[in-house]
């Protein structure tokens, strides 16, 4: 039986997603081309063998428009015969690219495929793709006449429903920075990072962050309009317990286990199970909970069978609510820090989580690991990998 394996995964450092950030001068095509070239160099793979390059990107607008994956494949120097496509499942776009890659191998449609992701949030601002237009339409509005809300307010609604205090959120955020700083100092990110234009380390980690300092920040999404709609909320989501705007790119090499053996490549992990789920689009960020339950059921595993889990820290309330619902071990949750410290370059984040999870499993000789992330519109992907 064909099995799909993860041979390698790389990423750029996380750059602050605003003018002045370390990666702001880099065109998004060049961001992506850098990790694509590094991936084939590291694995000594002939790029002519690649059947497809599937890339996640959310802001498919301006410099990231027109199938950014194809532009990057050519910019990386790959043969013109290598095809590429760009997909959007919001924040889970590169995780979805990874699913499509592995599922294509399992189906026999691909022998060798690259999953990737890119987002330059400093050059393509959040929401720019809508161009000020209504992306929903009258039938959607008829179903949801009160309208949806931005993700920050969804994070507030989650904190309220799961009774997560401001102190708990700030403690979690501070711990994310502390864990990421410790991992960076120990060189745990070195193997996954591809330096670019003089940037060799994550720019978003703040080692001196404390919960006491975060407690002084004001709620970021408390406006007269939001208070009028949700008058009973305590308003506890801040810039400090949320992920920052980030620039970055990532890429992973996927193939059949049999072909990897023939090519003399040592796979790092096997794909064990996949799931995708939808949930309430107003709460929006809760879908990792049903997605996790779904993927565990498909894998025949329980939460305690997992040696690590990466749950994207779009906002601190998301992994905390997930952990509460699943009964997860906090020591196994984002042990190298998460997006609050390491950034969230939307389309590239799924593979950043993959790199973190795989590195952690290898460090502790663990077997199974889970990654899941919330996505705009009330969606989530979940993936279980098995370290080899």
Image (cartoon, rainbow, N blue to C red):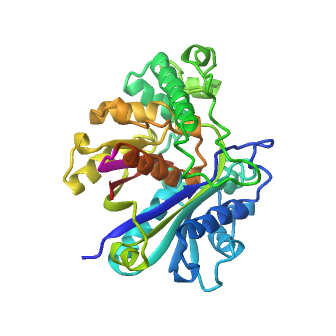
Name the quadrant containing residue 257.
bottom left
Point out the stretch of residues depicted in magenta: 365-371
Residue at position x 39%, y 65% in the image: 267
Q: Is residue 294 visible?
A: yes
Q: Is residue 136 visible?
A: no
Would you place residue 253 above or below residue 238 in this image? below
From the viewer's perspective, tell me whether residue 199 is left or right of residue 93.
right
* x then y, percent, for residue 186: 53, 36
Would you place residue 120 above or below residue 255 in this image? above
* x then y, percent, for residue 201: 66, 43
Residue at position x 61%, y 86% in the image: 81
Q: Nearer the viewer, residue 132 or 301?
A: 301
Residue at position x 25%, y 41% in the image: 303
From the viewer's perspective, tell me whether residue 236 is left or right of residue 159.
right
Q: How many marks?
A: 0
> Residue 295 magenta-drawn?
no
Q: Nearer the viewer, residue 25 or 217?
A: 25
Name the quadrant containing residue 189.
top right
Would you place residue 374 above or below residue 39 in this image? above
């Amino acid at each position: 039986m064909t099995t799909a394996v993860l041979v390698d995964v790389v990423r750029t450092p996380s750059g602050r997603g605003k003018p002045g950030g370390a990666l702001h001068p880099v065109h998004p095509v060049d961001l992506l081309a850098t990790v694509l070239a590094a991936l084939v160099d590291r694995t000594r793979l002939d790029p002519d063998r690649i059947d497809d390059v599937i890339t996640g990107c959310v802001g498919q607008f301006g410099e990231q428009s027109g199938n950014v994956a194809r532009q990057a494949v050519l910019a990386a120097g790959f043969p013109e015969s290598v095809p590429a496509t760009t997909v959007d499942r919001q924040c889970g776009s590169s995780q979805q690219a990874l699913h499509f890659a592995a599922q294509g191998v399992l189906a026999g449609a691909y022998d060798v495929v690259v999953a990737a992701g890119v987002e330059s949030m400093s050059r393509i601002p959040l929401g720019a793709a809508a161009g000020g237009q209504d992306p929903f339409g009258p039938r959607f509005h008829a179903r949801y006449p009160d309208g949806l809300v931005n993700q920050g307010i969804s994070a507030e609604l989650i904190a309220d429903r799961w009774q997560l205090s401001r102190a708990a959120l700030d403690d979690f955020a501070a711990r994310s920075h502390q864990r990421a700083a410790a991992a960076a100092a120990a060189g745990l990110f070195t193997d996954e990072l591809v330096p670019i234009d003089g940037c060799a380390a994550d720019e978003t980690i703040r080692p001196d962050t404390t919960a006491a300092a975060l407690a002084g920040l004001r709620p970021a999404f408390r406006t007269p309009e939001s208070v009028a709609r949700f008058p009973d909320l305590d308003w506890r989501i801040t810039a400090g317990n949320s992920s920052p705007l980030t620039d970055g790119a990532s890429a992973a090499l996927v193939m059949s286990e049999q072909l990897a053996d023939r090519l003399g490549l040592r796979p790092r992990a096997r794909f064990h199970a996949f799931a995708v789920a939808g949930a309430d689009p107003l709460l929006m960020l809760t879908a990792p909970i049903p997605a996790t339950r779904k993927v565990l059921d498909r894998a025949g595993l329980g939460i305690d069978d997992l040696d690590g889990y990466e749950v994207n820290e779009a906002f601190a309330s998301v992994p905390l609510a997930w952990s509460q619902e699943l009964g997860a071990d906090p020591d196994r949750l984002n042990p190298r820090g998460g997006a609050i410290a390491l950034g969230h370059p939307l389309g590239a984040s799924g593979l950043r989580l993959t790199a973190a999870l795989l590195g952690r499993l290898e460090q502790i000789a663990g077997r199974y690991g889970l990654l899941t992330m919330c996505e705009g519109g009330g969606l989530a992907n979940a993936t279980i990998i098995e370290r080899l």
